Amino acid sequence: MKEKSIKDFTLSWRWTDPKYSQFSEDELNKINPLETTMAMHYYNEGIALVEKNHFTPSKDKFHKIENIQTTQFKEVQNWLKVKITVDEIILSWDSNTAISVKTDLFIEKWDDFCYPSSDDIVISFKTKSSIILYHHSEIFWYADI
């Protein structure tokens, strides 16, 4: 389920290049790149829960939908702490690019994972009753069945 190392991952520069952010070895060990088949599985599963013409949770599939602008770092951290109650989550940028990451690291450094203007990310839970989306316009969406 893990590629050779995080340093071989397409987006590793986000966490290993001092121009962006340089995570410690302990932090890097909390990020596990998924093999292409698993990345595709989680992405396809998540994207099926998204509105076709917008990157928002499908109103047909979820009863509870909330969002938060990402302008206030600490406020977003607190919001994520309430919404993510599992130890590990899956982040999918596309059908080939996904990681599993420890929730505590993601919440602590969410802005090193979610880049404005470029990233649309499906954040999956293994329970499959909830989903979080990060939209490049700097909004997190949370949806629950």
Image (spheres, rainbow, N blue to C red):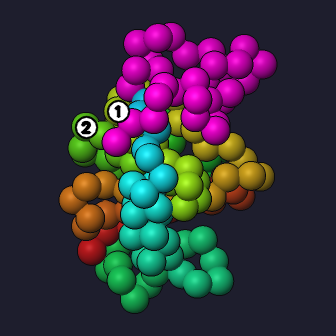
Report the Cα–Cα distance between label 2 and label 1.
Answer: 6 Å
Label 2 crowd (10 A; few <14 / some 14-19 / many >=20):
few
* Spot occupied by residue 95 in the image (x, y as percentages of width and height): 54, 61
Say the numbered circle drawn on residue 117: none
Tell me: residue 123, above or below residue 75: below
Which residue is drawn at the image coordinates 25% and 55% (left, top)? 126
* Spot occupied by residue 86 in the image (x, y as percentages of width and height): 24, 44
User: Which of pointers 2 and 1 lies earlier in the amino acid sequence?
Assistant: 2
Q: Quarter of the image containing the C terminus?
A: bottom left
Magenta span contains residue 25: yes
Magenta span of residues: 1-30
In this view of the protein, can residue 53 be seen by the observer?
yes
* Spot occupied by residue 18 in the image (x, y as percentages of width and height): 72, 14
* Spot occupied by residue 30 in the image (x, y as percentages of width and height): 38, 25
Write down the residue under mark 1: 102
- Circles 2 and 1: CB atoms closer than 8 Å: yes
Say the numbered circle drawn on residue 87: 2
Which residue is drawn at the image coordinates 53% and 36% (left, top)? 110
Label 1 crowd (10 A; few <14 / some 14-19 / many >=20):
some
Tell me: residue 44, above or below residue 21: below
> Would you identify the image quadrant in which residue 54 lies?
bottom right
User: At label 1, which amino acid type do we have?
Assistant: Lys
Which residue is drawn at the image coordinates 44% and 84% (left, top)? 59
